[in-house]
Image (cartoon, grey):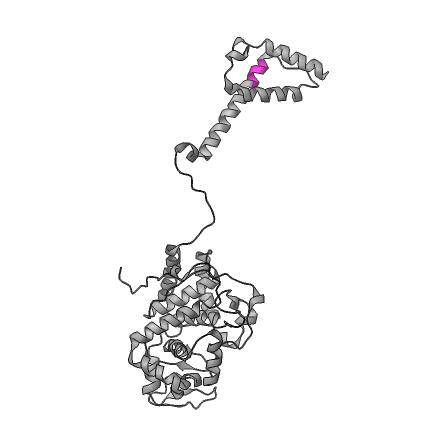
Amino acid sequence: MASAARSFTRNALRSAPANFKTTATRNARFVVPRQTFRQQSRRGYADSAAPKSGSSGLLWGIGLAALGGGGFYYYSQNADLFSGKEIIPKGPFTPKFEDYQQVYNAVAKALEEHDEYDDGSYGPVLLRLAWHASGTYDKETGTGGSNGATMRFAPEGDHGANAGLKAARDFLEPIKEKFPWISYSDLWILAGVCAIQEMQGPHIPYRPGRADRDLSFCTPDGRLPDASKEHKHLRAIFGRMGFNDQEIVALSGAHALGRCHADRSGYDGPWTFSPTTLTNDFYKLLLEEKWQWKKWNGPKQFEDVKTKSLMMLPTDMVLIKDKSFRQYVEKYAKDNDLFFKDFADVVLRLFELGVPFTTGEDARWTFKSSFDEA
């Protein structure tokens, strides 16, 4: 039966109109439809009567129309192949400086718009978030540091030293939603840089490259300073990160910003009269004001004798009691520019602790702040 059908098909093709009669007069573009037609003939007519020659012409027309339509679709989807343009392959999104500057600008705008927090700015708590995310680094084991953003998880987020930092993390969530490509780790540090600069502090170079980690990378409690301790504790905590006495004092200048909260750390009050502007006032006040123990039901802290509105922690007072620390307090109290220079240098190091960067130090960027001239 199949053999008879093939014979019938060959005879039908021989009886087709003259323009399809010989291969010499056929255009090469009809080869593909004919091949297709032959295959369809073998499959479709094996157990049924073959169509008349008129049906053959109809099928040719349908095949040509399909081929033409397919060619048009391919052209429309790949127009660049025929335009002579250089084809640049598309790959994963790789953010550049301009993209990170947009993130910076978004944080700065949010700081300006949300001025209801504490003394009028989320800046101090953003800086504290970046500092506490970085200050868990241990140079001996290579664990902790700003790579990972492990404070997102309860084991680390619930550490006593991190009390109140949920406010900073929640503040940054809309920024993360707007720029989902940036890791929490990079975002927290970038926000810390932004906070310093937007509170009129020095420019802090920034280098991206941090990756978020899971809760198995959470650091143990006790790696951050205990405000009730003295000089040996400070040197042990900061020495574990690789900092010396001068750098400890320079980092402590961040206490010019923000305040303590009785419902978080247990301590209460601001260190300076301008807690949303970074200056060397912390060092000046340490040296120039008279301090006494505060009489209250909270942990031991100092208050200024004159106004009783300012506070100092036991670890702050150590900086003027210890001779090695004090020499740097005196230098920074006299020279704000020197403080800014040393503060920027040590904060840069702090923010990069524990990060396995794939780029060199020359890849650091400096963001334009809202105080910079256009």
Residue 213 picture location, percent across and down: 54, 63
The image quadrant that residue 7 belongs to is top right
Residue 374 relative to residue 46: left or right: left
Q: Position of residue 299 (x, y in %)?
A: 48, 86
| Residue in the image at 43% along x and 34% along y | 81
State whether residue 122 appears in this view.
no
- Determine whether 135 is above or below 24 in the image: below
Q: Is residue 19 magenta?
A: no
Instruction: Name the one closer to the observer, 291 or 177.
Output: 291
Which one is in front, 138 or 83?
138
Main SS, magenta residues: helix
Compared to residue 252, the image places residue 103 above or below, namely above
How many numbered dots are placed on residues in this image? 0
Q: Which residue is farthest right?
A: 1
In the figure, 121 relative to 272: above or below?
above
The image shows residue 6 at horizontal and vertical percentages of 67, 15
Q: Is residue 29 visible?
A: yes
Q: Tell me which corner region of the image, top left, top right, bottom left or bottom right, holds residue 275.
A: bottom left
Quarter containing the C terminus: bottom left
Residue sitting at x 41%, y 83%: 316
Q: Which residues are magenta?
A: 54-59
Residue 55: in magenta span: yes
Q: Which one is nearer the viewer's eye here, 208 or 345?
A: 345
Residue 91 horizontal/vertical position (percent): 47, 47
Residue at the location (29% across, 74% down)? 337
